[in-house]
Amino acid sequence: MRYWLMKSEPEAYSIDMLAKDKTTPWTGIRNYQARNFMRDQMSKGDRVLFYHSNCEPPGVVGIAEVSALAYPDETQFDRKSKYYDEKATRENPRWLHVDIKFVKKLRLISLDELRTNKALANMRILARGNRLSITPVDPAEWETITKM
């Protein structure tokens, strides 16, 4: 099993929305590295730290689980979607997504709290310039965060 951190702006999709929906396709990823993580490394059952970004305060707010392997993101074919990609075809889709399912809400573990924990010093989300919406989480980091 692998561990991941997946970011979402709470106005777009929050942990409360996932709790209500129970499962959701993680659409709209338009970064090749994040897409490749989903395509090449994510497996059913992998655990996810659900992270609220671009809000005050940002931080980890819940746990989810990968519930379906990567498959084509339909938003790339929808001309009305902000995620439409004119170069994508059904024969050769450029963008994929996984499904995730709700596991549980956590108390907010803020970005500042993550930064002050020495055990998390090498966590990718804390690296300068990291803008990826999906990042791998080391098993020791997962354990540290889930015990906080």
Image (cartoon, rainbow, N blue to C red):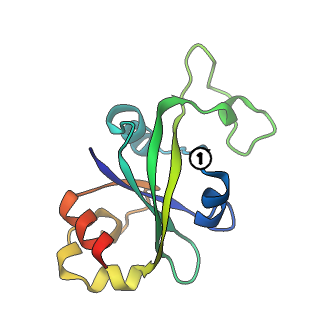
For the N terminus, the quadrant is: top left
Asked if residue 9 shows in the view, the reply is no
**Left or right, 44 with reference to 3:** right
> Mark 1 = which residue?
23
- Farthest residue, direction top: 91
| Image side of residue 71 versus residue 126, left or right | right
Tag 1: Cα neighbours inside 10 Å, few (<14), some, or many (≥20)?
Answer: some
Q: Residue at x 67, y 58 (%)?
A: 20
Vertically, is 72 above or below 100?
Answer: above
- Which residue appears farthest toward the right when viewing the image? 80
Indicate the position of residue 7 as horizontal and vertical percent values. Answer: 49, 60
Which corner quadrant holds the C terminus?
bottom left
Q: Position of residue 55 (x, y in %)?
A: 59, 77
**Residue at the location (35% across, 45% down)?**
46
- Identify the residue at image location x=18%, y=64%: 140
Q: Position of residue 108 (x, y in %)?
A: 47, 79
Q: Quadrant of residue 113?
A: bottom left
- Tell me where residue 72 appears, x and y as whole percent: 57, 28
Q: Secondary structure at mark 1?
A: strand
Q: Amino acid at mark 1?
A: Thr
Give the quarter of the image for residue 40: top left
